[in-house]
Each structure stands twice: as structure tokens, then as C-alpha cells.
Image (cartoon, helix red, strand yellow):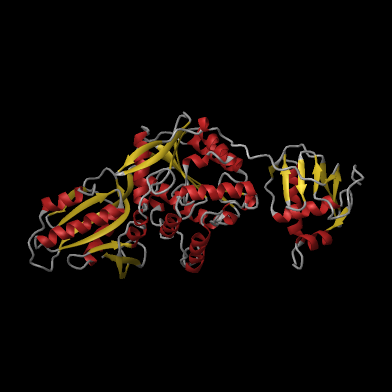
Amino acid sequence: MPDDPRVPAPGSARAYAFGVFVLDAEARVLFRDGQVVALSPKAVETLLALAERAGQMVSRDELIDRVWPDTFVEPNNLAQQISQVRRCLSERGDSPIAIETVARRGYRLVGRVQAVTNVAPAAPRAHPTSAADVPEVLYARSGDVNIAYQVVGTGPIDLVFVMGWVSHLEEFWTEPSFAAFLRRLASRARLILFDKRGTGLSDRVAESELPSLEQRIDDVRAVMEAVGSERAVLLGVSEGGPMCALFAATHPQRSLGLIMIGTYARRTWAPDYPWAPTPDAREAFYDEIRRNWGGPVGIDDRAPSRAHDPVFRQWWAHYLRHGASPGAALALTRMNAEIDVRDVLPAIRVPTLVLHRADDRCLRAAEGRYVAERIPGATYVEVPGNDHLPFVGDQDRLLREIDGFLGFVSDRAEAGSSLATILWVGRDAGTHASAPPVAAVREAVEGFRGAFSSHDDRAWLAAFDGPARAVRAASAVARVCRASGSGVRLGLHTGECLSTAVPPSGHAVDIAREVAALARPGEVLVSRTVKDLVAGSGLRFEERGRHTFAGGEDGWRLYAVV
């Protein structure tokens, strides 16, 4: 029996107090020291049922009927709720109560439990970081856009942290669990944080000009140059993973290593990628953004362990509102749905760690395994939990893996290969048109940061570090050649090339040549890989069927630039 004999009849008390805990029976909320404790509604209801009959055995059947009325569930579901409550109560070792198991019958709450008629209001949420402790926000110039960034710590290596979806640098530090996660990273490395263009404290841009993956990696490079970072480990969360993967593949000489947490290769369903949302599921999420932006959108899948914590819900809603406008959030989500980096993964040649929680509700663990299996030498680590946000739930397990990886990564010789987009410009053998004006072709290529070289007197090559720039350069070359009466066919492919070869060489060059041979006179034809990587760039394409390349994947789709 409880020590306090005044425990009232079940359901008549407003709250139950035990040590530093108060369980509000009306609001169905548990407080510790006046702060809301993150417990699922089922776990709270289980604890309340036991508190109402403290000292007495409550049978499993009674608890199941109470917690899951009119629903059939397996007994293991109850055991999971009991386990969650036990972990919460014993977290600091200061609980005056415990839950006893009565073998094969039920459970009993033992210890001092006191019924109270008034629930003390929760203490105001303490701001975890004073304004003076929030890292200074600085700005780097990327093209004509200002990118907000912060630098924290002075560790021996640089670590660039890329948050997924939307972000806001100052709001990172107003949630204690997020601030703690970042400070732990900053204890091992010089931590570099930034807001992607169009979000947070970086310049807002028109919704039609939100950044493609290519522009985002340009922003990373601009921030690294602003802070004097020659090489860094890239850490991408969720959508930040594909972005960091593309950076590491394209700029291996600037990438010490790659870490991806809760990541993916593609964001829409395909027969060979069945874990991504279907078009109907994507539309349903777009509708939720339209209706509910300003509230805690997506919290149930991204932070289920804290989805019913009112303080965290309020922070998440505030964070999203400050991270992006409703229109920008919808446009970003649509653009992210077009990301597909499957063909990029095999070209990554830096040490890689892929972390995923086993029961992640937002991105399936199978997606993390898929990514790791396609990156040469990558390490995949799956940890328990169902939260998608890395700073929610057991962040310590993730941080231990990151600590070990950072300790392993050291400065290495530059990689011998990198990801590049190759433009092949071939004279049309079927016409008697004049020869292309080589000087004008070179000027068009170099105007988009391409490296121009001649293959022979009937073909020219150019290598680009961004696929969208390559497509625009190819279109400019096509215009120059049309104006001069030259007959050319142009082909583009993104793939692995020898980074020191002039002219470039490798399988990507061979495929670009084959793509060009299939193009119509004056047409710019691209492989599926190029099209997948320019999502959000505003470029448009028309499908030109499938083609099997020598030694390549069977049945690649080809697209003509409109």
C-alpha cells in the first residue's frame, strides 16, 4: 500500500506527486522539477492507471483495456510502455517509486505516492543559452547571395554540419538537446554551420530560385573559403546527406570524410527503390504543409519520442516558421522529392560513415543500408530508436560513432578521381556544315567554369564540377554553333573521371561520347544521371527513350534539353 493513506479513489485526484515528479491526471502530462517529461500518451496512461491504485496489483488485462480501449493488442505492447516509464523514472536515480512485475499477472507501483488537488504550474522554460552564448552569425558571399554561417570550437579538423529540410542557425541553440548535440561535435572539431540559401538567416530568394544541389555545394565551398578551411569532414542530416555526398564526390580534394545520418538516395518511389513515398503520399504531405505550416508539421515522424511534449512541439513549430516561409517550405519539399543521387554514390572515394536508427519513421533504415552498400568502403551503423532528428532520443550513441570516425579520419593524399560532368561536342558527320568556331566554343564553356580541351579536330571535351552549369554551357555551345552554321551533336554525362588527366578520361567520357552520338543535329542530349542531379535548377527536358551503353547499366533513359 502507498505510504500516504490519503490516496483517493481511482480517477478522483487531479494529480499524483512522487519525489521530483508530478503526474497531472487531467492534462495527462508528467513533470519533473516543473519541466515536461517526454513520454508517449500510452506510457502516461499506463503510469496514471498504476498511480491511481498505488501499492495494488493492476492486472495486465485491466491495463490493456484502459490504455487500448476496444482494441486488440499483443501483451508486448504493454511491456514496451512499462519499459518506457521505468526508464523515465530511473533516469537520474532520484525516483521514490518503482514498478514491480507480478509474475504472469500484472504490475504494481510501489513507493511514496501522494494525491494532490492542485498541480503546480510548470516552471517557465529556461532559455538554454543566453544571447551572449549563441555563436556569432557571419556571412559568406556565394555568387550574389549571402550565406549565414557560424564557427564553433577549435578542434584539430574541420567539420561542416548540414541540416536537412529547413534550418535557422540561432534557433539551433534554443533547444537544449540540439545545443548539446552541437557542442559535443564542437568538442572534437572546428564545427562549421550554415543556413542554405532561401532558409534561416541566409538571403531569402524567390521560390522559383530556391537552390539546386549544385548551388548548395557552391554555398558549402563559399563558407569553407570564408573560414579558411581547405579540407573538412562533411556531416549531412536527412536531405543534407545527398548534398554532402555530391560535394564529397565532386570535390574529394576538399573532403576529409563523409558522415550521413538518416539519409537517402532518392525521395520518390521507384520499383528499385521501394522505400520512398509514393506520389500520393508526397501529395498528402504537401497538403499538410499548405494547411498547417506554422505548427509542428511532420513532428510525429521526425521526433516521435517527443511528439507529445508541448515544449518541444512549440520549439519545433517556431523553428520551422523561422526557417522558411510556407511557400518556400512547399517549394523546397517539392524540390527535395526530385533528388536522386544513386549514380553518384559509387564515385565517392573518401572515408564514409552512414548512421541510421533502426525504426526511423521518416526515412527507413533500408535506405541508409542502400546508400552505404553503394559507396566503396563505407561503414554502416544502425542504432536503436525511432527518432529521425539526431539530437532527439539517444544522441549519445550517434555521437560515440561520430567521435570514433573523426578520430580515424586523417589528412590523406588527394584522390586520383572525382565526379565531373563531361560535355562531348562532336561534329555532325552527316552534314557539310562549317567547322565549329573553336574559340567561341571555348569561351562559352569557360563562361560556365568548365575546363575546355580538344579531343581531335572533330570533337571537343569540357569538364564541369556542376551538372546544371554543364547543361547551360552545352546549350550556349549549341547556340554558338547554330549561329555559325556549324553542325554538332552534344552529349552530357556525370560520372567518375581521373582528376589529373588532361583531357579528362574515364568511363564518364566514354558515355558522354555515346550520348552525343545519339543526339540529333544541334541537340543537347543528357543521361538520366545528369537530369536527376539538376533538380530545382529550372532546366526542362524531354525524354528520348532508353539506351544500353557499352559496359554500362542496361536501359539508361536519355533526355533532350528543352
Q: Percent x, y for residue 156?
A: 46, 29
At 50% from the left edge and 34% from the top edge, which residue is drawn? 134
Q: Residue at x 34, y 66 (%)?
A: 557
Viewer-nearest residue: 224 or 506: 224
Please provide percent x and percent y for residue 273: 48, 63
Residue 261: x and y, percent?
51, 48
Q: Is residue 327 left or right of residue 177?
A: left
Placement of the C terminus among the 4 image quadrants: bottom left
Observer able to see residue 509: no
Q: Nearer the viewer, residue 8 or 540?
A: 8
Q: In front: 479, or 260?
A: 479
| Residue found farthest to the bottom | 545
Q: Is residue 273 visible?
A: yes
**Residue 130 position by quadrant:** top right
Relative to 143, is 268 above or below? below
Q: Residue at x 31, y 62 (%)?
A: 527
Q: Is residue 108 left or right of residue 464?
A: right
Query: Residue 543 placed where, x, y %?
Result: 31, 69
Horizontally, is 331 left or right of 544 in the view? right
